[in-house]
Image (tube, rainbow, N blue to C red):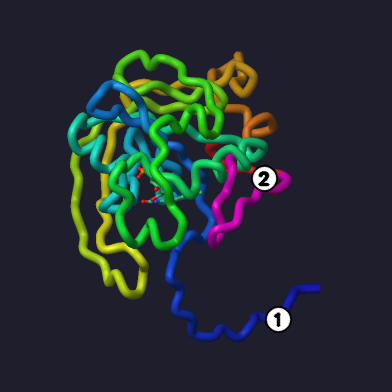
Amino acid sequence: MERPIERSVRIQPKILYIGTPVVLVTSENVDGTANISPMSSAWGFADRFVLGMGGTGKGLENVTRTRECVLNVPSPELWQRVERLAPTTGQEDVPAFKREIGYRFVKDKFAEAPFTPLPSEVVRAPRIAECPLQFEVRVRRIEHSELDAERFGYPSLAIVEVEVVRAHAHESIVDPANGHVDVSRYSPLLYVFRHYLPTGKELGHTFKA
Ligand SMILES: Cc1cc2nc3c(=O)[nH]c(=O)nc-3n(C[C@H](O)[C@H](O)[C@H](O)COP(=O)(O)O)c2cc1C
């Protein structure tokens, strides 16, 4: 039996995390060490990703300076390591709005999670060995936007468009017949209105697959 169409009510969401994969952005600090910034405002198309990055984060500072980073895609079983990084920033001088809600400065996020650094092939920031997908990217453009800090808790964001210059996948998720990612062995970790969720069973595939 088909369900009747439901009535909708007006809402005023503070966040728009409607269910997007978690991405761990690795970037190079000034002193050559690496930072990890958890994020979920990332979508990919062709050879581009578009990222929504908080204006005061270390990640944005690093990619603005170095014009490159790595997008590492964790699998659902890594959620607790992601969450260990959640209340941290690589920003030594923790912005007041973050300090007030419990963020602290962590210099070595690889040790904090913990994750294993793996040298990249094209960019200087390392990859995260545990993540089944890793995209080395170069920045094409950054657009800054002011926000209503009262409403959102942070004052600004930037839309960062990047181009993939090298893509890596764990061997176990690649179909050797065609080099495609085998979705029976890969699934992303979703961030849904600040909750971590795995994906469910496959429903089907599009005509091109
Ligand atoms: C699962 C998850 C998803 C997040 N998504 C985003 C996001 O899409 N954009 C963003 O700017 N911050 C996001 N954050 C918050 C950043 O991780 C946070 O601002 C962090 O301090 C950034 O680290 P950094 O200052 O070292 O770059 C997310 C955090 C978590 C745990």
Mark 1 or 2 closer to N-term?
Answer: 1
Given residues 60 and 121, the one toward you in this image is 60
Q: Residue at x 57, y 25 (%)?
A: 130
Q: Amino acid at mark 1?
A: Pro
Q: Residue at x 52, y 33 (%)?
A: 112
184 left or right, relative to 114: right
Specify the quadrant of the image occupied by residue 127: top left
Secondary structure category for the residue under label 2? loop
Residue range in magenta is 188-201
Tag 2 residue: 204
Image height of 91 relative to 184, above or below? below
Residue 201 pos. (x, y %): 73, 45
Tag 1 residue: 4
What is the count of numbered marks?
2
Specify the quadrant of the image occupied by residue 95: bottom left
Image height of 144 relative to 58, above or below? below
Given residues 157 and 108, the one toward you in this image is 108
Is 193 part of what is drawn in magenta?
Answer: yes
35 left or right, relative to 209: left
Q: Residue at x 31, y 59 (%)?
A: 96
